[in-house]
Amino acid sequence: MTVMFGNPGSTELPFLRDMPSDFRYVLGLHERAAAGMALGYALGTRKAVFVNLHSIASTGNGLSAIQDAWYLHAPLVVTAGQQDRRQLYAEPFLKSYAVETVKPYVKWVHEPARAEDVPAAIARGYYLAMQPPRGPVFISIPMDDWTRECSPVAARKVSETVLADPNALDDVVRALDVSRNPALVAGSQIEEDDGWSDVLKLAEHLSADVYQDPIPSRWTFPRSHRLFRGGLLPAQQPLAGQLANHDVVVVLGARIFLYYAHVPGDTIKPGTKLFQITNSPDDAASALAGHGIVGNIAHAAQYIRERARSRRNPSAQATPAPDPSQAYPISAAFLFSTLNKVMPRNAVIAEECPSSKGDLDTYLKLDHPQSFYSVPNGVLGFGLPAAVGLQMAMPERRVICAIGDGSIQYSIQALWSAVQNEAPLTVIVLRNSDYSALKGFCDFTQVGQNVPGMELPGIHMTKIAEGYGMSAVEVDLPDALEPALRAAFAANEPRLISVNVAKGGQKCMGMDQSVNRPNYR
Ligand SMILES: Cc1ncc(C[n+]2csc(CCOP(=O)(O)OP(=O)(O)O)c2C)c(N)n1
């Protein structure tokens, strides 16, 4: 872990002193940005990343990124300074209760009992962070510990793969062999377990329809593949409806299921056999239905393919996206269809555009692994720093951050880090000057529109970007969009394009008024 992300304070200075020249410190101006960039870097490199925060002050600010790492199974080793051990008892200025604060969202929290235990604690945190399911750990380190001597810690190997029970996988094979119409659901753990090609081969072997999990934090199946049927809706009744024609459903690396609005119904149509293969014991235990099998997804997919009978379905076809009209103001559909036309085919998307998620999903056809990352548990502030970290981790690909003008404000400081670290990402801000997604949710839940705090007038995105040193352009007319995008991709520097888009939010996460929507009147 030689690249570290952080924001320093007095309790971290003894640690940061005389940093070895083969270490790189990436400064975030706010901890949401620092830890969020580390998260993107961990996702991009698929390795553990070191984060150094300041006492409780900055651990609190960075907590939402730590929470994202928890839900995204991203291995972060987070440390924060604590006051000097010798005066902790007397509740000094900057005393930190960070250990208690972060506990629900990390795999392990620790404040070593002795200064001499600090290096071993960091090593232990690393090994644990890398165990499936991966995730963040947190170590609080008193500031006087860094000046003490200790014995070196031996570098050890700890294996990182846990395989599923073959007997349980044989049950899946038997069910598939007698199935009339099986389906696969692809979840984000496919990428965690490096299972992209094994799942693709399994789908083709079975000629099974493949759905992406609801509100996906990653895309884990090629979007233009003839077997791909799109994403599942995040509510019980409509989701069970989408899968109603399938008699066997195998969920690979996702929860059963991630819901948003409460639209009651069956988890799965009665009679359908549901299997969940997951690297998370917790997800298996908390599933609402189905047989849970815990283990590595790539291995499980390969095991099943080698044993299940193959099928053919020559009539399966990819669904083409409809042509969007070139209306004024620019619609999200037009924006994403234009982007799809001009972006590099191996582009990486970091998405945080709540009311336009559906349009992005419809129009962006990316077929490469590690192409899409999104906010995992609805905590805004993920998108921009994740994009910066991803771009730093994958310099050979172009990262595009598609983000709402509301969402970008939660971690806006990452613009500065992109410039300082010469990360040539393209930030596309969907400037609709309101919280369209919340307005849509007001409609969907029948709350009505008489709600304050929904408008965002007077935000000048290009001036903000320029203030942090980033080139920026505003696009208002549809004709200006394509040239602006092309210019950004041709430039070898970070750029921000602020696009004035139509207000959105007619649908709630893809669900329209036809479902049995909740009523909070
Ligand atoms: C940290 C945080 N604060 C508030 C919210 C609630 N929230 C959900 S969507 C949304 C609107 C985001 O606005 P914008 O990025 O402009 O996207 P739009 O809704 O206009 O598509 C808000 C405030 C949240 N999810 N996370």
Image (cartoon, helix red, strand yellow):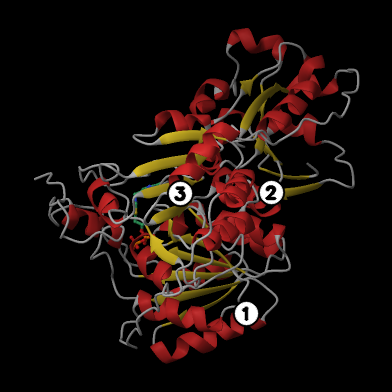
| 240 left or right of 224 in image | left
The answer to whether the residues at label 3 and label 1 have Cβ atoms under 8 Å apart is: no
Residue 67 visible in image:
no
Q: Nearer the viewer, mark 1 or mark 2?
A: 2
Q: Secondary structure at mark 1?
A: helix
Q: Give the farthest residue toward the left.
A: 521
Q: Residues within 10 Å of mark 1 (few under 14, many from 20)?
A: many
The image position of residue 385, as x and y in percent, is 57, 54
Q: Tell me if I can see residue 51 in this picture.
A: yes
Task: Name, please, the residue furthest toward the bottom.
Answer: 479
Tag 3: residue type? Leu
User: Which residue is denoted by mark 3 in the rendering?
Assistant: 176
The picture quadrant for ligand 1 comes to bottom left
Residue drawn where x is 30% and y is 63% of the image:
434
Residue 112 is drawn in which quadrant?
top right
Residue that label 1 marks: 489
At 62% across and 37% down in the image, what residue appears?
Answer: 134
Residue at the location (68% across, 69% down)?
397
